[in-house]
Image (tube, rainbow, N blue to C red):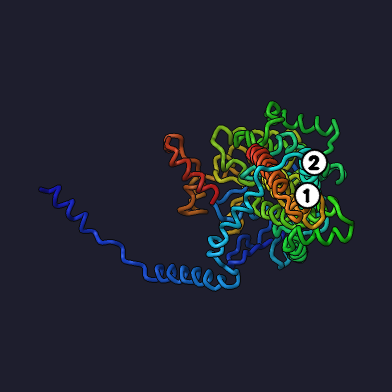
Amino acid sequence: MNSSISTSAATAADLPPRDLKRSGISFLLWAFILGLLAWSWEGADMRPMALIENSGNMVDFADGFFPPDFLMWKYYVSEMWITIQIAIWGTALAIVCSIPFGILCSENIVPFWVYQPVRRLMDSFRAINEMVFAMLFVVAVGLGPFAGVLALWIHTTGVLAKLFSEAVEAIDPEPVEGIRATGANGLQEVIFGVIPQVLPLWISYSLYRFESNVRSATVLGIVGAGGIGMVLWEYIRAFYYAETAAVMIIIIISVSLLDMISQRLRKLVT
Amino acid sequence: MLVVDISRLSKSFTRGKRALDNVSLQVREGEMVALIGASGSGKSTLIRHIAGLLRGDRDGGKIEVFGEVIQQNGRISRGARKVRADIGVVFQQFNLVSRLSVLTNVLTGMLGRVPAWRGSLCLFTKAERMRAMTALKRVGIDGHATKKARNLSGGQQQRAAIARTITQGARLILADEPIASLDPASSRKVMNTLDRVNREDNVTVIVSLHQVDYARDYCTRTIAMRDGEVVFDGPSTELTPEFLRELYGEYSSELFAPTPEAIPASGEAAKKDLAYVTS
C-alpha cells in the first residue's frame, strides 16, 4: 500500500519547464544554416541532375581508368620519393624557423609589441596557400622541387609558429620561475623552463604537419614545383587515364603509409 | 653582516587589498628565520619580493640583499639578476622542470654563474657536474640523479630543489612553504636538510611555514605576519599557544599541526588538505 503511494508520487513529478530562450536560439541557428545553404546554391552552380543526365559519359570516362597502367611504375615511385623529399625539407626548415617565431608569438614570454607584429607576420604566411607561394617561387627560382620546398617552408612556418606558441602559452609557469630564481637569463629561462615542457607537443605538431605537407607536395607539381604532381598533371592534360590511375594509386598508398608511420610516432611522444 | 634589509615595503594587488603593509625587517648572516602566518597573510608575497620575482608599490619601499638593492620604489634594479645568483629559492610546488633529469635540474643552479652561451647549450664541466652530484649526495638523493624529476616523490623533489640552491652556491635560501605539500616524515627530512645547510655552510635561511611547531623546532627567530603586517618578531620560544591565540584569534588553530590521532585516514581528508594548501 505504502509503496504504491510512493511510486505514484514519483511519477507525478513535473517535467522541467521548457526553456523558451534555448529552443528559440536553436531554431534561429538552424534557420541560419539552412538559409546559408540556400543562398550558396546558385553561386556554387549546384546541378545534381547533371550527375544523372551525364551518367553515360561518366561511365565511359571511368572506363578509361581501368586497368591502371603500371608500365612506368619505377618512374612514378622515383617521383613520389622526390615529393616526400620536398616535404621533408620544407617541414624541417619550417620547424627550425617556427621555434623562435613560436616563442616570439607567445604572450606569456614576450611583451605585446613583440608578439603582435610577429603574429601578424605569421598570419600572412599562413593565409596564403602553399600553391600560391609555389607559383611565385617557380618564377623566382625556376621550375622544380626547390620552389616546392620554399613554398612549404613559408606556409608551414606560419602554421607551426601558431601551434608552437599555443603550446607555450599553456605551460606551467612555476618551473620557469624556479629557473629564473637561479639567476638565469631570459633565453635560459626558455631553454630550461619552457622547451622541456612543450617538446612532446611540438614534436607531435611537427609530425602532423609533415603528414599534411606530403599531401600538399603531391599537388605542388601542378604549378611546376616538381615531384609526382608534375607527372600527374601532364597525364591528365594528355588524357592518359590509365597512367593517371596508376599514379593516383601510388600516391594513395604512399600517403596512407606515411600517415600511419607518423601517427605511430606521434603516439610514442605524447 | 646584514643579509636582508627591507624598509617600508608595501604591496597592493589590483583588488585594493594590501598584501604587504609597510614591512620593515632585517635578517643577519647565518640566521634561520621562520615566517609564520595564516594563508593570505603575506608570507609568500614577502618572499617573492625578496627574490625580486614581484615588485612592490611605488611608495618608497626598498629591499637590499647582501648590501645590493634588489628593488626600490616598485622597480626591480638592474643588478637584480646578479644578486639572484646568490639567492636560492625553494618553492612550495618545488618548481622543478618535471621532464628534465634530477641532475639537469640541479645543474640549472649554475646558470647564473657560468658564461651565458655555455649555460644555454647545457655544456657543464665535469667539475660542475661533480658539484651537483655532491649536492645531491648531501640531501641524500644522489641515487635518483638520472631519473626525471616528476618520477620522484614530493619530499625527494623538494630535496632536489634544495640541492639546486646548494649547487648555486646560494648564501641566502628563501623557502616558500617548502613543506606545505608534504607528509610529516618528508617534512622532517626537508627541514633537517635546510637546518644542515644553515649550520654547516652558514647559509642564511628564511623559511615560511604554516605550522608553528616546525618554527619552534628549527628556528631561533620567528617573524609572524597577519594581513600583510609584521605582528611579531622575536625568539620562537615565545610562541606559546596562548600568545598565538592573542595574535591570530580564531585562526590560531590552523597554525598547529593536527595531532596524529586527529588525522582521518581517508583519502577525502588528504584531498581537502591539498585544496587547503594550494588555495
Q: Quadrant of residue B203?
A: top right
Q: Is residue A188 left or right of residue A48?
A: right
Q: Which residue is mark 2?
A: A75
The residue depicted at 72 percent of the width and 59 percent of the height is B7
Q: Is residue B45 above or below residue A23?
A: above
Q: Chain of mark 1?
A: A
The residue depicted at 67 percent of the width and 41 percent of the height is A253
Count of marks placed on residues? 2
Q: Position of residue A1 (x, y in %)?
A: 10, 48
The one nearer the camera, B255 or A92, is A92
Residue A231: which disc? 1
Q: Quadrant of residue A120?
A: bottom right
Q: Is residue B239 left or right of residue B4?
A: left
* Residue neighbourhood size for the residue with mark 2, other residues' Cα within 10 Å, grouped as few (<14), some (14–19), many (≥20): some
* Residue neighbourhood size for the residue with mark 1, other residues' Cα within 10 Å, grouped as few (<14), some (14–19), many (≥20): many
Please tell me if label 1 and label 2 are on a single chain.
Answer: yes
Q: Are marks 1 and 2 in contact (CB under 8 Å)?
A: yes
Q: Chain of mark 2?
A: A
Query: Which quadrant holds the C terminus of chain A?
Result: top right
The residue depicted at 72 percent of the width and 28 percent of the height is B137
Which circle's residue, 1 or 2, is located before the other in the chain?
2
The residue depicted at 74 percent of the width and 58 percent of the height is A158
Residue type for callout 2: Tyr
Q: Secondary structure at mark 1?
A: helix
Residue type for callout 1: Val
The one nearer the camera, A177 or A20, is A20
Q: Position of residue A78 (x, y in %)?
A: 80, 40
